[in-house]
Image (spheres, rainbow, N blue to C red):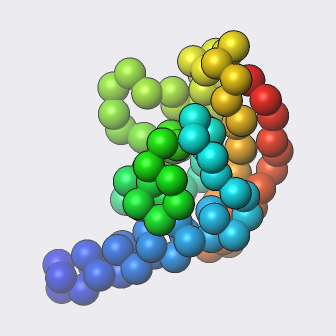
Amino acid sequence: MIQREFVKVSTTTQRLAKEVGELVELEDKDVLFIEGLPPHIHLNEAVQWYWNPNVEVYATNDAYRGTPKTLEDTRKFYAGKGAELYFMSFDDGKLKLVSTEKL
């Protein structure tokens, strides 16, 4: 049972990481903020591995201390750094690009 759940989460994480690259072309220093991910899905390492190791991924479900937990916190954290911020939402099992902005 535990192994089946692990495979399910891994497969979902892989699929969503690939979806990110289908929605945007990530370059060094780009930042993603994702709203609405399930609590067990974390995409930072997967997106870095698939697309670009020099991007940052934050989400509303992040449990790590010191990381931005909202879109506004992410904007403030990267203000003036010249990063491209991609705001995505997870809904109905898929990712959707909501907005793009230069910070």
Residue closest to the eye, 14 or 53: 53
Residue 72 horizontal/vertical position (percent): 68, 23
Q: How many marks?
A: 0
Residue 16: horizontal and vertical position, in percent? 54, 69
For this orientation, the residue located farthest to the front is 28
| Residue at screen point 57% across, 18% down | 77
Residue lying at the far left of the rendered structure: 2
Left or right: residue 38 versus residue 82 is left
| Residue at x 58%, y 35% (from the top left corner) | 29
* Relative horizontal placement of residue 101, taking residue 50 as reference (left or right): right
Residue located at (79% from left, 29% from top): 102
Residue name at image x 80 percent, y 42 percent: 100
Residue 8 picture location, percent across and down: 36, 81
Q: Which quadrant of the structure image shows residue 30?
A: top right
Q: Is residue 72 visible?
A: no
Residue 15: image location, x then y, percent: 52, 76
Asked whether residue 2 appears in the rendered view, the answer is: yes
Q: Is residue 78 above or below residue 5?
A: above
Q: Is residue 22 above or below residue 72?
A: below
Quadrant location of the N terminus? bottom left
Residue 78: quadrant of the picture: top right
The quarter in which the C terminus is drawn is top right
Q: Nearer the viewer, residue 52 or 8?
A: 52
